[in-house]
Image (tube, rainbow, N blue to C red):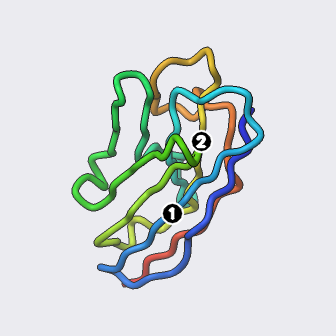
């Protein structure tokens, strides 16, 4: 597994911006996929964005497309999520996730990932 630590959550008014960071450490392999998920109270965990080394592909969920940007710094072993034009519906705990070495590419299923950060709260008020 990979040790993941998120940072950068907080509270913001609608229309504002936040940046999330995920630092990876204590790993013996480079995960093919690193992703951001979020989970709001009473809802399932959903994938927001992901970056895969397979074809250098990037995924952005339709619900945040045009507002969120994901990037990955391989030299720093980090994953980032820039969130702009935030809306109350973006309120959730945001998690960083990494896939095991046998999994190629990314998936929207949380079961695809074997490493998770502790989560960081993002609250958007109207």
Residue in the picture at 71% in, 55% down: 118
Residue receiving disc 1: 20
In this rendering, the answer to whether 16 lies above or below 86 is below
User: What residue is rendered at 59% in x and 52% in y?
Assistant: 95
Disc 2 target residue: 97
Picture coordinates of residue 26, whole percent (x, y): 77, 40
Task: Work out which residue is located at the far front of the displayed protein and give it.
Answer: 75
Q: Position of residue 34 (x, y in %)?
A: 52, 38
Residue located at (37% from left, 65% from top):
83
- Quarter of the figure with the N terminus: top right
Q: Residues within 10 Å of mark 1 (few under 14, many from 20)?
A: many
Residue 8 occupies quadrant: bottom right
Q: Which label's residue is closer to the chain start, 2 or 1?
A: 1
Task: Tally the numbered discs.
Answer: 2
Instruction: Check disc 2 and report its element: helix, strand or loop.
Output: strand
Q: Secondary structure at mark 1?
A: strand
Please determine whether, in this image, residue 14 is positioned above or below residue 82: below
Query: Residue 29: percent from the left, percent from the top?
Result: 67, 26
Residue 23, position as x, y percentages in the image: 63, 52
Image position of 83 (left or right of 28): left
Q: Look at the image and tell me in which quarter the C terminus lies.
A: bottom left
- The residue nearer to you, when weighing 42 against 119, is 119
Mark 2, other Cα within 10 Å: few <14 / some 14–19 / many ≥20: many
Picture quadrant of residue 59 = top left
Q: Compute the Cα span from label 2 to label 1.
A: 13 Å
Residue 36 relative to residue 54: left or right: right
The residue under the point 46% across, 45% down is 72
């Amino acid at each position: 597994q990979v040790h993941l630590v998120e940072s950068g959550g907080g509270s913001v008014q609608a229309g504002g911006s936040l940046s999330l960071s995920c630092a990876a450490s204590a790993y013996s392999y480079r995960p093919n996929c690193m992703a951001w998920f979020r989970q709001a109270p009473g809802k399932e965990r959903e994938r927001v964005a992901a970056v895969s080394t397979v074809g250098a592909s990037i995924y952005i969920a339709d619900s945040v497309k045009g507002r969120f940007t994901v990037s990955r710094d391989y030299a720093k072993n980090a994953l980032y999520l820039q969130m702009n034009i935030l809306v109350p519906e973006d309120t959730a705990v945001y998690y960083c996730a990494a896939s095991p070495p046998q999994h190629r590419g990314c998936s929207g299923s949380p079961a695809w990932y074997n490493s998770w950060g502790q989560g960081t709260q993002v609250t958007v008020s109207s």
